[in-house]
Image (cartoon, rainbow, N blue to C red):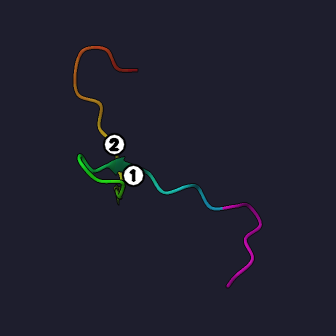
Amino acid sequence: MPEFVLPPPATASVAIAGSTERFAVRRIFCVGRNYA
């Protein structure tokens, strides 16, 4: 396994309804009026 100078960022994920598993995603889009 390679050594990184800086640790890689954590993988973004979303919860799966009715399960303890999570689904990895590349981007999370905020849809609505109250987002920054």
Q: Which residue is found at the position 67% from the left and 85% from the top?
A: 1
Structural crowding at the residue carrying mark 1, measured as other residues with C-alpha within 10 Å and reported as few (<14), some (14–19) or many (≥20): some
Query: Would residue 24 be counted in the magenta stretch?
Result: no
Element on which disc 2 rests: loop
How far apart in space, not on screen, are marks 1 and 2 (Cα)?
Answer: 9 Å
Structural crowding at the residue carrying mark 2, measured as other residues with C-alpha within 10 Å and reported as few (<14), some (14–19) or many (≥20): few
Quarter of the image containing the C terminus?
Answer: top left
Q: Tell me the quarter of the picture where residue 2 sits.
A: bottom right
Q: Tell me the quarter of the picture where residue 26 sits.
A: bottom left
Query: Would residue 3 be counted in the magenta stretch?
Result: yes
15 vs 18, left or right, is right
Q: Which residue is found at the position 27% from the left and 50% from the top?
A: 16
19 vs 13, left or right, is left
Range shown magenta? 1-7
Of 24 and 31, the residue lying toward us: 24
**Mark sitting earlier along the chain (1/2):** 1
- Residue type pointed to by label 1: Ser
The percent position of residue 9, horizontal first and vertical second, equals: 58, 55
Residue pushed farthest top? 34
Q: Are marks 1 and 2 in contact (CB under 8 Å)?
A: no
Q: Which residue is found at the position 33% from the left and 42% from the top?
A: 28
30 vs 7, left or right, is left
Of 2 and 23, the residue lying toward us: 23
Q: Which residue is found at the position 70% from the left and 61% from the top?
A: 7
Residue bearing mark 1: 13
Give the label on residue 3, or none: none
Q: Main secondary structure of the magenta part?
A: loop
Give the label on residue 28, or none: 2
- Residue type pointed to by label 2: Ile
Element on which disc 1 rests: strand
